[in-house]
Amino acid sequence: MTFLSYLISGLSLGSVYAIIALGYTMVYGIAKMLNFAHGDVIMVGGYMSFIATAHLGWPPLASVLLAMVVCTALGIVIERFAYKPLRAAPSLAVLITAIGVSYFLQNAALLIWSSNPKSFTSIVRLPSLKLFDGELTVSSVAIVTIISCIIIIIALTFVIGKTKIGKAMRAVSEDKEAAQLMGISVNQTISVTFAIGSALAAIAGVLLCSAYPILMPTTGSMPGIKAFTAAVFGGIGSIPGAFWGGLLLGMIEIFGKAYISTELSDAIVFSILIIVLLVKPTGLMGKKISEKV
Amino acid sequence: MLTVDNIHVYYGSIHAIKGVSFSIKKGEIVTLIGANGAGKSTILNTVSGILKPKTGSVMFQDKNLIGVPAHKIVAGGLAQCPEGRRIFLQLTVVENLEMGAYTRPGNELADSLADVFDRFPRLKERRNQMAGTLSGGEQQMLAMGRALMSRPTLFMLDEPSMGLAPLLVQQIFSIIKELNDTGTTILLVEQNAQMALSIADRGYVLETGRIVMTASAQDLLHDDNVRKAYLGGT
Ligand SMILES: Nc1ncnc2c1ncn2[C@@H]1O[C@H](COP(=O)(O)OP(=O)(O)O)[C@@H](O)[C@H]1O
Ligand SMILES: [Mg+2]
């Protein structure tokens, strides 16, 4: 029973990582940059939902929508003002800018909401599920998180595989100049990618805070780094890679904590990443290096 | 239809195009010939809006294209089939063609696809294959078909014969001629000067970023200097 309960916790944490990792990987695939501010967008999403429910008395679902709208706008603004001017700049300059944006968001949050942790009330207000005569308790947040992640991956696969904008995203990811010759606006496509990624970050933020209810300006940074790890683990640029990478990472973390050591669980996570990258540098589902990056 | 006037194009400090002017009238096939590195692709990319000239103007159907972003130029009826094909290898054949029609209304798609499949039956057979699995000749056909999906009035082709077997080259050129017969104006860039001049009305000879000669295709085919430099003649 405890094994099952760890498995569900792992899947639930992994689902949050997967949702965040999808944003990382999409932005990387299309704009060819690592948006290290992605984790902090999660934190903003958490605060938006917190304000809406705790101060404005909005229903939980409305607070999620607010978080998504604000984060989508934030993602578009960040891309427009911080990254777009650097489209032709060396990738190191873009990377440093992304780190700068990350600190900017954390410090802005510090100014607005102070460093005092807020205690977040879960947006899932259902009772936990008791199974096997009460031997196994599954929190409703965990279930909602896992289901959300599955819905998101299905929807995203559809959008990227079948819709016009999704095909344009793949075209831009492969060859920006050729895409422009087709009449595709590269800027607009990148902007849409940031919008989708940031909306997902908002959902991840709300789910994360619902499961781990302490909200601070730095709340997004560790999950952001873990999700980045998950994306690299799965093969950065690959959508299924981010999904499986996220799930695996969440499970490794929870099982590592449970059966090996609480203190070492992060070390275990990163050691596994290093081993995977040594054996398969493109990640579990990464595409061949032949594609110019 | 297209008038390029005294453009200068730079890559950083490299002065690649040094004051090039040329024009194309509706219904013509005009060819730009020149050795590797002469600046042919740079000129096409400038017309397409991928590169911005430092000075000079590009007028297409009485509209100034300077400053118009590349993705808006296609919608105006100017398509380029780029050098090296540049098809989307990870997209299927049909998806590639759909991207070609990106700026067109959705209700045209079926007709445009039928047109392209008519012209390139091989693409129809392979419509659901990944473009990366096509042979070189098929990839060239896909690149052309994809550009045609935007229903261009001016169609620019950058070395469509590159790397193809002679029989395929013949086929590609007869398709270009057919396109022209059905009303599409053509700007053809080639290193294969013999083939290009054989279907063109007029030609320009480009050397290190400058136009050094222009004449009717017939005159160029018989010009001594052109024969020596580009046609392997004596
Ligand atoms: N991306 C680039 N960066 C720097 N120089 C370039 C670039 N592309 C082309 N050039 C230079 O510009 C000149 C013209 O190139 P190009 O237009 O490709 O010639 P062509 O198509 O006739 O072979 C060449 O000297 C080439 O080296
Ligand atoms: Mg060239």
Image (spheres, rainbow, N blue to C red):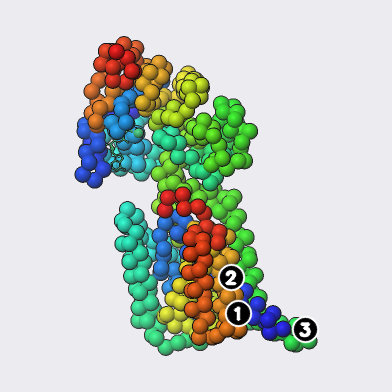
Q: Quick one: quadrant of the N terminus of chain A?
A: bottom right
Q: Nearer the viewer, mark 1 or mark 3?
A: 1
In the rendered structure, find residue B212 and report the number of the disc placed on it.
Answer: none
Q: Farthest residue to the front: give it.
A: A279
The vertical placement of A1 against B55, above or below, is below
**Mark closest to the chain's N terminus, 2 or 1:** 2
Subunit ID for the residue under disc 1: A
CA–CA distance in space, label 2 to label 3? 26 Å
Task: Name the spot of residue A292 as percent of width and height, x first.
Answer: 42, 50
The amino acid type found where label 3 is placed reads Phe
Towards the viewer: A12 or A287: A287
**Mark closest to the chain's N terminus, 1 or 3:** 3
The vertical placement of B192 against A75, above or below, is above
Q: Farthest residue to the right: give it.
A: A133
Q: Quadrant of residue B13?
A: top left
CA–CA distance in space, label 1 to label 3? 22 Å
Towards the viewer: B144 or B72: B144
- Write down the residue under mark 2: A248
- Write down the residue under mark 3: A132
The amino acid type found where label 2 is placed reads Leu
CA–CA distance in space, label 2 to label 1? 10 Å
Helix, strand or loop under label 1: helix
* Residue B67, visible in the rendered structure: yes
Residue under disc 2 on the same chain as residue under disc 1: yes
The amino acid type found where label 1 is placed reads Phe
Task: Name the spot of residue A183 as percent of width and height, x first.
Answer: 44, 42
